[in-house]
Image: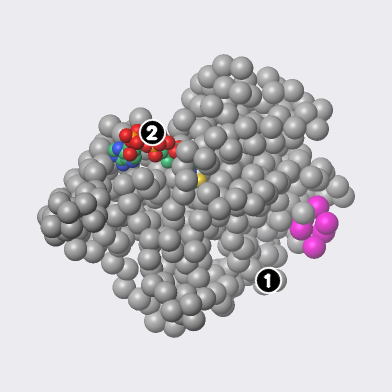
Amino acid sequence: MSSAKPYSVVISGTGLFTPEHIITNKELVDSYNRWVRQYNRKHAAKIEKGELEAKPESSVEFIVKASGIEQRFAYVKEGILDIERMRPLIPERGEVDLSDQAEMALHAAREAIQTAGKTAADVDAVIVSCAYTQRSYPAIAIEVQNELGINGFGFDMLVACSAATFALHRGYEMVTAGTARCVLLINPELTSPQVNYCDRDSHFIFGDVATAAIVERADNCTNSHCYEIIGTKAKTQFSSNVRSNMGYLSRVNDVDPFGPDKLFHQNGRRVFKEVCPMAERHLSDHVQSLGFTIPEIKRWWLHQANINMNNMIAKRLLGRGATFEEAPIVLDRYANTASAGSLIAFHLHNHDLVAGDLGVICSFGAGYSIGSLIVRKK
Ligand SMILES: CC(C)(COP(=O)(O)OP(=O)(O)OC[C@H]1O[C@@H](n2cnc3c(N)ncnc32)[C@H](O)[C@@H]1OP(=O)(O)O)[C@@H](O)C(=O)NCCC(=O)NCCS
């Protein structure tokens, strides 16, 4: 945990890239159920003999009740609903072309830079932080740096659902330490290629999006609408309950690099049970460690994985349910966007706070990992 040191640090701009394609629960469930019926027909003999289990159908009602998700955005929709494919069809780009994640990142980054009133010359570092990157190197961040004409340095980091908050922590530390005046943090969450659209338990969970933030020294900030970061806190605890085993060793393990265990999978019930109390303890400790009380926090920009998780954490923290104003929800529209959820909530719902108001940005998820920032409207 750290608190303000030599330089006071602010979040002075954010950006959001929302892909143009929407997939509703109904579209997703219709396609999944057609796929299931085809699967069960294809394997009817084995199912009849008891050698294989028939796959049950998915339902819109279950998805809304279990998750609060009503739709998700897709970077590319083509292919996802095609029962002969069940994954997006994203044409490969050449090595001289802009990568998909850099393109998503640039949309969000340009908005964040513009909102903060900065130019490329003001930015000293670029961090691209998300749940997956489409290649190992060169870093997507360096590609973005090059596109924007930024001096200094860039690097990628992966922290699953906490990638955005952990990157904000790194930006904050770089600015407080004086190693950068201004840092651009970007979260191009291209999650759809990792979703197993043939898995009833998880086919509905994720959406694609990109978020970005500018973190800089308060004395350089020219945006009157900004938030001072007054403390950061991170916690990780190893768990295999949320996993993606996609990786380069598949080549030498002689296994299917795209098998179900290589895609996103989880023990959702365990995650729910274990992460909610962890997140609640983490947040109350963080708030108290800075001398504040829970009722003093005006807004909770919480991770957006599941409405029931958010409700339970808010209830444990506040002793009652939170209003939309206190803890805004975006996952009905965006679904779980890996690390970007709390940043989407912040981006869309921070403009009404007034000077002195306190808020908390918090992520929680795979790792397990929890990251929080306590901010104060300047
Ligand atoms: C994932 C999650 C939404 C599933 O909700 P849940 O209420 O725990 O659901 P379960 O998996 O226990 O399933 C409940 C029932 O619905 C059924 N079901 C599961 N998926 C279904 C679907 N898509 N459609 C219809 N029914 C479904 C199950 O088979 C089960 O039936 P049963 O009671 O007859 O066995 C929930 O566990 C959760 O919120 N986990 C938190 C973790 C999370 O969101 N992580 C995201 C990444 S960090």
Kindly give the residue lying farthest to the top in the view shown.
320
Taking the image as shown, residue 161 lies to the left or right of residue 126, namely left
| Magenta span contains residue 235 | no
Q: Position of residue 227 (x, y in %)?
A: 67, 39
- Quadrant of residue 275 within the rendered picture: top right
User: Which structural element holds mark 2?
Assistant: helix
Q: Which of marks 1 and 2 is nearer the N terminus?
A: 2
Is disc 1 placed on a helix, strand or loop?
Answer: strand
The residue at which mark 2 appears reads as: 66
127 to 334, vertically: above or below? below
The range drawn in magenta is: 174-179
Q: How crowded is mark 2: few (under 14 residues within 10 Å), some or many (20 or more)?
A: few
Residue found 56% across the figure and 46% down from its top: 365
Task: Judge from the rendering whether residue 251 lies leftward or rightward of residue 145; answer left or right.
Answer: left
Identify the residue shown where x is 13% and y is 55%. 44
Disc 1 and disc 2: Cα gap in Å?
42 Å
Classify the position of ligand 1 by quadrant: top left, top right, bottom left or bottom right: top left
User: From the Cβ of disc 2, is ligand 1 less than 8 Å away?
Assistant: yes
Q: How many marks?
A: 2
Above or below: residue 337 compared with residue 82 = above
Of the residues shown, which amino acid type is indicated by label 1?
A: Phe
Q: Is residue 113 left or right of residue 282?
A: left
Percent of width and height locating residue 335: 40, 43
- The outermost residue toward the right is 6
Residue type pointed to by label 2? Ala
Which one is closest to the eye, mark 1 or mark 2?
2
**Could you say which is closer to the camera, residue 135 or residue 277?**
277
Q: Which residue is drawn at 80% across and 63% down?
A: 179
- Residue 243 in percent (x, y) is at 51, 56
Q: Is the magenta stretch mostly helix, strand or loop?
A: helix
Q: Mark 1 points at which residue?
A: 153
